[in-house]
Image: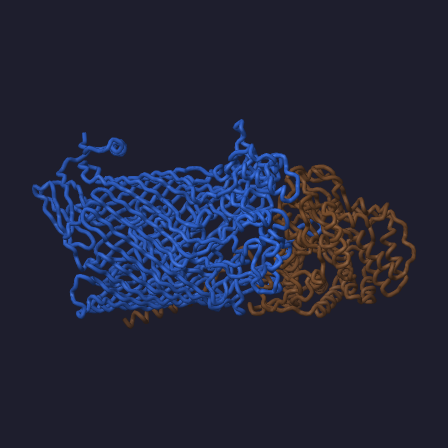
Chain colours: A blue, B brown
Amino acid sequence: MMKILPLPKKYILIVLLFFCAISGAIAQNITINGTIKDNTGESIPGVNVVVKGTTNGTATDVSGTFTITVPGSDAVLIFSSVGYKSQEVTVGTQKLINVVMGTDVKSLDEVVIVAYGTQSKRNVTGAVQTINSSELKDQPVGQITQKLQGKLAGVQITQNTGIPGQGMSVRVRGSASISAGSDPLYVVDGFPLQGSISNINPDEIETITVLKDASSTALYGSRAANGVVLITTKRAKAGNSRFSFNYFSGLQAIPEKGRPDMMNAREFAQFKKEIAIERGQTVPEQFANPEQYGEGTNWFDAVTRDAIIKNYSLTYSASGEKFSTSVVAGYLKNEGVLLNSSYDRISLRINTDYKLNDNIKFGFNLAPTYSSSKTPQSDGIWYNSPSIVQSAMLTSPLAPYINPDGSIPLSVSGQYGTPDAPNWYNQVKIVKNTSKNIGLLSNGFVEIKPIKDLTFKSMIGIDAGNAVSDYFYPSTAGNIFNPPNENDPSRINASHSNQYAYTWLFENTLTYAKSIGDHNFDILGGYTTQAAHSESGSLSGRGFPDNRVQTLNAATIITGSTDVQDWSLASLVARVNYNYKNKYLFSASIRRDGSSRFGSDNKWGNFPSVSAGWVVTDESFIPENKVLSFLKFRTSFGTTGNNNIGNYLQYANVVPTNNPFNNVLLNGSSIAGLNNTELGWETSDLFDAGADINFFNDRIKFSYGYYKKTTDNLLYSVDIPISSGFFNYTTNIGKIEFWGHEFQVSTLNLTGEFKWSTDFNISFNRNKALQLGTANSAIYGDMTITQVGQPLGQLYGLVWDGIYETQAEFDASPKHQGAEVGSVKYKDINGDGVVTNDTRDQAVLGNTAPKYNFGFTNTISYKNFDLAIVCQGAYGNKIINSADRFTGNLDGTFNVQKDLANRWRSEENPGNGKWGKASGNTGPERDWASSKWMYDGSYLTIKNITLGYSFSSINVAYLKGLRIYASVQQAAVFTKYPGGNPEVSAGAGLFSGVDNTTYPVPRTWTFGLNYNF
Amino acid sequence: MKTKIISAFIAALILSSCSEDFLTKYPETVVSAETFYKTEADFKQAVIGAYVPLRNIYGTGLADYGAWAMGEMRADNTAFIYNAANRGYADREYIDQFIDDANGGGVSNKYQNDYIIIGRANQILKTIDAADFDQVKKDNYKGQALFLRAFAYFDLVQYFGDVPLVLTPPTTYAETNVGQTPKAQVYEQILADAAAAAVLLPNKATQDVGFVANGAAYTLLGNVNIVLERWADAEEALLNVQGYSLLGNYAAIYNPANKNHAESIFEVQYYDLATANSASNFAYNFLPILQNPGVIAGFPDGNSNAYAGWNIPTPDFLAVYEPGDLRKDASVGFYTGEGYTNIPYIKKYVHGAEIAPNTNDDWPVYRYAEVLLFLAEAANEQGKSEALTYLNMVHANPRTGLLPLPAAGQAELRVLIQKERQIELAFENKRWLDLVRTGKAIEVMNAQGNSIRANPQAYYYPAGVTPPGYVVTAKHLLFPIPQREIRINPLLVQNTGY
């Protein structure tokens, strides 16, 4: 039937499978093959090949080859690609058409997406970085932000938790607000989103552009202070009609590095036996003979698993004279490595363009998504909720999670040496915590060119969504100190909540682009309004008769509440770009924003910017040379804002505070805060300077940027003395300075048959608080402090000084209350001879922000093989592993780290100096936050290694290209940090740097294929 | 170009003028303060809201810090069962062991909730005069606000000494930073507020049940004067406490079925209806640590009680009861089982629960028996002979099963009155402040500390645990200002020794 070139047998099977899915007649016209190369003999991938006058087209694959079927010998093929001169070739009698395309110097001006439009890359005067979808393929992850790790200079992207579909943190240039949010603004096809982009199928995305400086972000005004991420989704390209199918399937497993190092059954029994002896207590019988035990239960293993991830993506795009469309359908199934956790997503995107005539164009985008997730309470400290990962670690390894007879015990009783607790292996499965989301992001626009050079664009869009979540906690669940009791239905509780929300946008812009001689203008003006509304309700129920009915129908006591939230934003935007001979570049822009979130005295804010650039290599005094191929200097200055503070904070509200009197509940009301009519914009002044330098005909591209950002009027819910009657007050209180350097180098190391290119970026981000409130009093977090003159959110606590190892050392040292020989020792910082657990002896322990972040990508190809390696790292930050408080507990309450075998026992046997004695007052070692729990958080992670093979000469209709690949995500993590995940919260926020134990980040082994029809 | 700028400018004008409505969004789920504090109903609700923090002060939630830790367990009446399995509440132990510091949950619970009451009362007092409604109701609400403010400041000044004196709600951020006022001045304000409240409030018969009446204000006024040793003023105020009588049965005082009874002057109201979210839990805190609290009559089975073992009566306290005192059996229970032999626990508040761990017990703050004992004390200090009469009204009430005390000298009677307070008001958070104001705290507590060190197991420590602390000095007569406040407010000075 069809001619298939010799292929390894297993691939033939896969290929056949896909052919089975396609039925229909196969037209037999003339089939043309060929390879496209550039002047240097390099093959060019992605060249559009179109039969002139038709919509029939294709594109070259990674090795520059194409196959196209033409109706007859008079057909003309058009070859086009950005950066090359287009060519037309008449087919005639040729079956093989090889083309050499000349570079087009003028079109080297790659177009980049900017705020409210596009701009030639060489004319950009701001700090902008674009990533194309081709650079993001292959990584077997569900979220687009995971694919961006390591690729963007000055953008810290970290994975704070491994929960499927969650946990990515994106910080542009170390951005941090005190409380008004630090996430960048995401704009998808011109629509500023209210939340994150985690529900977007990465395969829908064409480009991602990060705007970092004021000149590029100021047009987003009051929401731009943390940077802006512009996302464009795939649209059909002219003359390009194609079907493609992408698939990957992988196995996720938790790597050895990252698993907690807890005692096994024998070690734990030995530990319990020894501490009883050390305290002069009778050794409980079950610990008297530790040798009888083996490994016992590894609770971390018991609640985790190897899990499957699968992704299917089908893309169709077609383009004609009038009408073009692109459709992407995707399905992601991501089981989590924690039992009973998962994230599934079904998505569809249809982008359609319709050209009425040369002057009027319409476009419609429609992107429904459905996602559902199961999220057991995995993260956090055990006592805040039954957070399973940490709770499981602390549970006795003597206790079985499955009985020898195969039955599953409900609880771990105190007889195993740790407190009464549920069987976590059971708990993780029986507590229901699910959520389902439906989202619909859609917009439509019309573009009219009433006169030459003038374009009017009007866009209307809506982002609507509905989310439902359900929770059921059966009587067979519990937490530490509160084990399950199947016969106590009063333990059962359930909740159901839903949220309906929409955001709409209406936007009108006029652009006028004109060149007069060597003067080129581009003027933009417009106004835009956006408003959001959400309604949510939640019901919770108690008084269930038993665990059988898990909906609220069975609850006898149901309480509920509803909430309504609104915000609105009305804005004017204007921008002028001007350049002279594309050599001297100027730009100025302004946005005026009004927001419902601020007090009546401060509703409106202005956000202007100016920038300039100079393309030095276009000057006549730089002679044509082979070394320096491009040099541009650029600088910008401007103001942006941050209004991300929640709604209604300017108002003092009266909230219900009911109280019973004589067994009757009466309605009470109390004022919940102080009014602030002056609540206003958090504004950032940004200065940016940079240079782009290319050498050796652009084989080496170097880019440098310096920035300095001063954020004033910081929005913060500042702690106030309770003598005011209130705990906090939302106000504009402070000033922070951010500055940094970022470097980016791209090199083409080898060309020819063996190709190797490298991208490296490194950024140095710093910050300092300049002013905090009227009194400049420090802001304290949980083990962090922010004070004037110092970096934000430094770790703070007592300074650990080992153990009082000997009586002599004890006598000679300052002591805290209850100190003894063999107990923990802290430094007496204020030198008053006594150690107190408060500001007198607490000190800054370390900085939570890395000294530098870097990313490193190598791309290698040889013949049909391609290999990519992506690395990311950070250096110089500190992390407090708060789990140490419990996994280092000397009371014998919990299972502990193996290292506790090295604790102090006597002056003769002082152990390794890290752990004090198990008898006596263990409170200060257990409860006082100190540098004992602090570690170096530097890391280098090989994020991804992908090896692919492209079948170059598949001479079959309907199979235009096939590439298979194998990939390892999160391949290796190099770090001294002993906790699970060094990326836990490495952002430079105010309260970061404390690891409260999170869902493990798995390593993923995948196999995938890209298949073009 | 020029026309463009002009048209953009015009557009800006149009947009900014038309969109004020578009840009003004008021919350739909709450009332804005600007429209509140106007009507009689508003003030009624505001007054009810001002009572709410009292529930937190006296204890809500198993894991919370009730006033019993600082008021009772600190003193010699009670100790705790050392919980080897759960060390998470060690800072409650530190209060008993006199090694507490400014980080403790107990001090912040008291300090914060007292100031929340004061903040709510200030808001009422600032706005009520301008509101237009019935004067009788206005006086009533104003009186309650003044009482609650005085009560909260009295609690603060006794436990923390000098504290910030805030009488009007701050209107700006800068105004929220206030330094300490000498405690003498705070006392004057408390006296003024309590006296004003006593005049404004109706008597118990006409007041809504459960709300404070003028009897509560006079009792407070008497209590403050007792602490200040202004004996005549105290006596005068206390004699105004009218319309109350002692119940014939001691156990009935605490029974939730009798809430707001004839003897009750001021009690903190709890309610165990599940949807009311205002149940009490302290009875569970006061049980021995039990696998199954259902072994104590009235409590449902299950829900192992790891938050228990607090406020356990000491052997020293049990020895104070005279033989035949019926109050002992009503106050203290003993449990044997689950490894305990005759472990004492507070029984006063044990009335079971419908749904664990929510109980319906109120907390008695002021009751008429205390007024009589205050009167005895005030009379005795003035050398008046009625002292013995007042004392015997409590001591020899039929409900105690005891005989009247014979006449005694002033010094002897002083001791007897304090002993009567220790027994009659046991576990009602009176003992620590009584020890402090009578100057006995250091002596009594060091003596008990010696006993504990000599025999920790008699004070419920397990073998092998050496209790730290129990060294009591003058610094311990006040508690530390919570660390949060010291950090935030540079004007505050920490109490000496902390």
Q: Is residue B184 left or right of residue A284?
A: right
Asked whether B106 or A897 is in front, the reply is A897
Question: Can I make out residue B144 in this image?
Answer: no
Vertical order, B166 against A239 (above or below): below
Task: Give x and y (percent) for residue A797.
Answer: 54, 58
Please state the total of marks drawn on the protein image: 0
Q: Residue at x 48, y 63 (%)?
A: A715
Q: Quadrant of the C terminus of chain A?
A: top left
Vertical order, A756 against B19 (above or below): above
Task: Give x and y (percent) for residue B477.
Answer: 72, 61
Q: Residue furthest bottom?
A: B2
Asked whether A306 or B219 is in front, the reply is A306
Q: Quadrant of residue A225?
A: bottom left
Q: Residue at x 87, y 47 (%)?
A: B401
Q: Residue furthest left?
A: A93
Q: Quadrant of the N terminus of chain A?
A: top left
Q: Residue at x 23, y 47 (%)?
A: A319
Q: Residue furthest right?
A: B407
Task: Give x and y (percent) for residue A801.
Answer: 54, 56
Task: Give x and y (percent) for residue A676.
Answer: 53, 66
Q: Is residue A414 left or right of residue A630?
A: right
Q: Quadrant of residue B216?
A: bottom right
Question: Can I make out residue B493 in this image?
Answer: yes
Q: Residue furthest front?
A: A908
Asked whether B196 or A483 is in front, the reply is A483
Asked whether A342 or B455 is in front, the reply is B455
